[in-house]
Amino acid sequence: MPPASIPSPSQAVWHLGFIPIRAYALCFVVAILFAIWLSERRWQARGGEKGTIGDIAVPGVLFGLVGARVYHVMTDWQTYFGPRAIKEPYQALFIWEGGLSIWGAVALGGVGVWWACRRRGLSLSAVADTVAPGLAFGQAIARWGNWFNQELYGSPTTLPWGLEIDPAHGGEPGVLYHPTFLYESLWTTALGFALLLVGRRSALEHGRLFALYVAGYTLGRFWIEGLRIDPVGGVDHAVTLLGLRINQWTSIVLFLGALAYLWMTRTKTTEPSADRASSPS
């Protein structure tokens, strides 16, 4: 065993009687609760009604979980369907085994939040700006679920912080791998603090703080994704286009979209104080 490395957990499931406690699911629960807690504090600090974010989060989380799983299954469908499938089709529903995509979570989760905001007469952009730092910190926490599942690791490395992967999860004895889960966790933690700082010092409203979150996340995700060796779109290989993985292209598109939004809204002024009391941003 290498003398300097990051070990992988010996187990990812504990049992409380007959009830399995899965580390992957636990990481996501903690991530969601922390994001809601922080966003609720930010909303109230801007004059919003207590409990609003918690109410909005319910459809957002439910829609987000569905979207996260659907995107994963769509981009890795051969794992569950077809002659080369290594899992049964019904296992596409087993979210505790891993496979929740941030792209699908934000996309469909956003639909749930939009619906909740529409029902309550709230500004979607105000809510988006409020929850942006919480989303970043939540992602930082949730990524540790990949560590427990020994999945989504990077290519072999000789760096002292290389990650050990058991042979049962595709690792080779004596070989260390880039801990991409850790890279993304550190990146999104730094992004979360940066968003808090920018939000305090600048009047980034009308969805611009959320756009900055998207730009910051996709910038880091692009290079981290390039280190990964797990398949996306196939069982034994990752589908690429012009040498880039699917999620790298997604990062490019969303990064450019976020920059375009920031540019198009650059002349928008701060919302009137009367509006901010009911729809804080």
Image: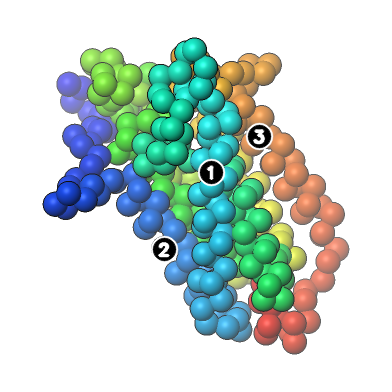
Residue receiving disc 2: 33
Give neighbour class at mark 2: few <14, some 14-19, many 20+ (Cα, 10 Å). some
The C terminus lies in quadrant: bottom right
Tell me what residue is drawn at x 53 percent, y 26 percent. Answer: 76
* Mark earlier in primary sequence (3, 2): 2
Q: Where is residue 80 shown, x and y percent of the image?
A: 47, 25
As drawn, the label of residue 68 is: 1
Front in this rendered view, residue 197 or 236: 236
Amino acid carrying mark 3 in the image: Thr
The correct choice, above or below, for 152 with respect to 142 in the image is above
* Helix, strand or loop at mark 2: helix
The correct choice, above or below, for 240 with respect to 208 in the image is above
Tell me what residue is drawn at x 38 percent, y 56 percent. Answer: 29
As drawn, the label of residue 32 is: none
Amino acid carrying mark 2 in the image: Leu
Disc 3/disc 1 C-alpha distance (Å): 14 Å
Front in this rendered view, residue 213 or 237: 237
* Mark earlier in primary sequence (3, 1): 1
Apparent side of residue 204 relative to residue 234 in the rendered image (left or right): right
* Helix, strand or loop at mark 1: helix
The N terminus lies in quadrant: top left
Apparent side of residue 225 relative to residue 172 in the rendered image (left or right): right
Q: Where is residue 59 shown, x and y percent of the image?
A: 56, 62
Give neighbour class at mark 1: few <14, some 14-19, many 20+ (Cα, 10 Å). many
Disc 1/disc 2 C-alpha distance (Å): 17 Å
Residue receiving disc 3: 250
Q: Where is residue 243 shown, x and y percent of the image?
A: 63, 16
